[in-house]
Image: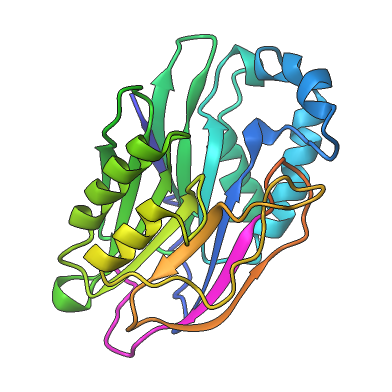
């Protein structure tokens, strides 16, 4: 079953009309800074490694600077993590009172693979959606803040490697966000914004690409721009940048938004 957790000890702080977002593929907390690490770190995908938590602590220090964080490639607690729920671990270390893990590949004790959203304020609604494709194991996670026409929808995705599957998945996400004037889509999309499937998304929705696309992969020598934060025009982008934070094979993407006064981030 997917895991979700909400802190009860204290009310969440109220976020201002400036909203700081981060999207980060954290590769199960495995540090990669050279090509050969794909080989030398392969065992860490199946066995516990003490260095994983040290790397996660470094990641948590970065996450603490943001209001809503989209994380890809996390484990909800299995043998390979020493049964540590990585979503819960990062949320608590970074001081997030609300989080939700979407379990996309349940391999029992071997792996609990999925994605997660962390938030500093309680969302009005959280919903999980399975993305189409021949290979199962891809999902979209939606958090909604507020109600009615002024609701804010934040969606996390990690798309497939194949172009045809990505196009089907982006078509699905476009329909998911069709009724929202204020929407954010972020995650590892495994393609650039000038790809055929992304251009189709922009034609079929009101989502816009950020002004400058910077490479995010691989982290040690970025060449491909495959991690993105996309927003609808009503959300003013104050800044958008790739963060030089090498704790994974991807670099994180950060964005600061100025929200319309009508948007309420309370449940």
Relative vertical location of residue 197 with respect to residue 137 in this rendering, above or below: below
Q: Would you say 161 lies left or right of 151 here?
A: right
SS assignment for the magenta stretch, majority: loop
At which x and y percent is residue 123?
Answer: 32, 59
Q: Would you say 229 lies left or right of 242 here?
A: left
Relative vertical location of residue 101 with respect to residue 194 in this rendering, above or below: above
Quadrant (top left, top right, bottom left, bottom right) of the N terminus = top left
Residue in view at x 15 percent, y 77 percent: 149
Compare residues 250 and 79 and report the one nearer the observer: 250
Q: Is residue 123 something that shows in the picture?
A: no
Magenta segment range? 252-267
Residue in view at x 26 percent, y 33 percent: 132
Q: Quadrant of residue 86?
A: top right
Which residue appears farthest toward the top when viewing the image?
109
Residue in view at x 34 percent, y 35 percent: 165
Colouring: rainbow
At which x and y percent is residue 33?
Answer: 84, 40
Magenta stretch encompasses residue 262: yes
Q: Would you say 144 lies left or right of 178 here?
A: right
Relative vertical location of residue 208 with respect to residue 116 in this rendering, above or below: below
Compare residues 259 and 35 and report the one nearer the observer: 35
Q: Would you say 258 lies left or right of 206 here?
A: right
At which x and y percent is residue 40?
Answer: 83, 19
Which residue appears farthest toward the front when viewing the image?
196
Compare residues 180 and 99 and report the one nearer the observer: 180
Which residue appears farthest toward the bottom when viewing the image?
261
Q: Is residue 242 something that shows in the picture?
A: yes
At which x and y percent is residue 124?
Answer: 25, 60
Quadrant (top left, top right, bottom left, bottom right) of the C terminus = bottom left
Magenta stretch encompasses residue 140: no
């Amino acid at each position: 079953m997917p895991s979700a957790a909400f802190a009860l000890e204290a009310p969440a702080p109220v976020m201002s009309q400036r909203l700081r977002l981060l999207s980060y593929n954290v590769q199960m907390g495995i540090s990669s800074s050279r090509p050969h690490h794909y080989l030398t770190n392969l065992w860490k995908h199946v066995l516990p490694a003490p260095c994983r938590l040290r790397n996660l602590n470094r990641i948590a220090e970065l996450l603490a600077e943001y209001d809503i964080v989209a994380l890809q490639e996390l484990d909800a607690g299995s043998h390979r993590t020493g049964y540590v729920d990585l979503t819960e671990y990062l949320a608590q270390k970074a001081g997030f009172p609300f989080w939700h893990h979407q379990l996309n590949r349940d391999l029992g004790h071997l792996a609990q693979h999925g994605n997660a959203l962390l938030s500093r304020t309680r969302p009005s609604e959280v919903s999980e959606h399975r993305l189409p494709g021949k290979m199962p194991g891809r999902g979209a996670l939606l958090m909604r803040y507020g109600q009615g026409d002024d609701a804010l929808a934040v969606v996390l995705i990690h798309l497939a490697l194949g172009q045809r599957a990505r196009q089907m998945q982006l078509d699905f996400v476009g329909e998911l966000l069709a009724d929202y004037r204020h929407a954010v889509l972020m995650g590892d999309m495994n393609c650039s914004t000038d790809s055929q499937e992304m251009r189709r998304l922009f034609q079929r929705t009101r989502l816009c690409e950020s002004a400058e696309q910077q490479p995010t992969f691989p982290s040690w020598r970025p060449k491909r721009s495959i991690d993105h934060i996309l927003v609808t025009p009503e959300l003013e982008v104050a800044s958008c940048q790739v963060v030089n934070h090498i704790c994974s094979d991807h670099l994180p993407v950060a964005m600061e938004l100025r929200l319309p006064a009508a948007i309420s981030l309370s449940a």
